[in-house]
Structures are given as structure tokens and as C-alpha cells.
Image: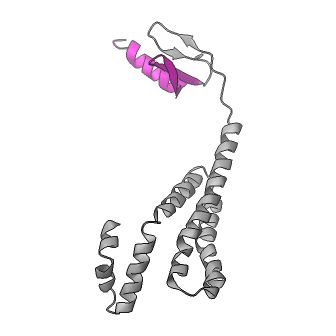
Amino acid sequence: CSVLFIYAEFIFSLFTKDAAVIEIGARMVHFLMPTNIIYIYIEILSGGLRAMGDTFIPMLLSCGGVCGIRIFWIYTIFTWYRSLPVLFISYPISWIVTFSVLFVLFQFIITKKINTQNIPEITITTNTDGYWYNDWLTDGYFMAPVDGEYVFLFRTSHVQKMLCRDQCQGK
């Protein structure tokens, strides 16, 4: 990114010899590069939503937010104030609006998924090996003591493997 920012004029000159196009392209790069970090968060949130199993809504919000807001901007704000900075500002504005909508949706879906998960009760018992774990008959979670605080949760199957690895050697 810094190479493009520093050498924008040179890179644009590889594609055109028109000085006006090179100057406008370099101005656009210099304006948008610092704000492009906002777009990264759009990709992260939409990727997270897709990873949770919903592909259509993130696609719709990304396209509608990023492209739709700019099209709206061109037909409204840009018609009243015809200048390159007004056109350039439509990019970070569309990114901020899209990010905000995706963030609210992401928080809503995460909260909904956490509240609807069926996490079993944890019955903690101890063993002579120092591990704390729940009843083996439930498909629950395992808690390991770390510096006096019980913070790590593991699936029971992982605990059984770990305990067997430590205790079943030579058997």
C-alpha cells in the first residue's frame, strides 16, 4: 500500500500518458489510501457472517452498501456539488455506513446464536492428576486450572484423549 501511495504518479503513468488522468488518479489514491482501513473491517464482518452460515445477507449488504450508496451519492450529492473531493468522499462514507450496518447485524446474530445454544450443565469434579472435569457421561466441557483460575473450556472428548495420553502410557 505504501508503494502505491508513494509512487502513485509513476504507477498511473504505466497505464496512460495523459497528465490530467495521472494527476486525478494520484489524488484519488492519496485521498483513499488512509481511509481504506474501513473497508478491511467490512470484509472481516461480512466474512464472519458468511462463516456463520449466512451468505446472502452479507453479499446484499456489501453490494448495496458499498455500491448502492455511491450510486445514490452520484445522483444526489454529486449533482449539486460537482468536484472530485465530493466524489472521493463517497467511498469512505459508503464504507462507514456499510460497516455500521454489518456491525449491528453481526452483533445481533452473535447474540442470537449465543442465547440459543444448548450448553450442558457442568458438574465439576476433581481427579488426583490436578485436572478438573465434568461428568464423563455428558457431552459437556472440561475446565483446566490455570494459575488458580478455571478459564479454559474444552470438549469432553479432548479431555479424555489428554487424560488418557498422560495416564495410559505403557498400557
Quadrant of the image occupied by residue 46: bottom right
Give the residue at x 65% y 61%.
57
Q: Residue furthest top?
A: 128
Can you tell which quarter of the image residue 140 is in?
A: top right
Compare residues 147 and 81 and report the one nearer the observer: 81
Q: Toward which corner of the image does residue 71 lie, by quadrant?
A: bottom right
The quadrant of the rendering that contains the C terminus is top left
Q: Nearer the viewer, residue 14 or 93?
A: 93
Judge whether residue 55 can be spotted in this image. no
Q: Is residue 16 above or below residue 30?
A: below
The x, y position of residue 51, in whole percent, is 56, 51
Residue nearest the viewer, comparing 165 with 2 = 2
Evaluate whether residue 39 shows in this view: yes
Answer above or below: position of 151 versus 80.
above
- Whether 161 is among the magenta residues is yes
Magenta highlight range: 141-170
Q: Residue furthest bottom?
A: 18
Residue 3, position as x, y percentages in the image: 30, 69
Which residue is rendered at x = 65% and y = 84% of the image? 75
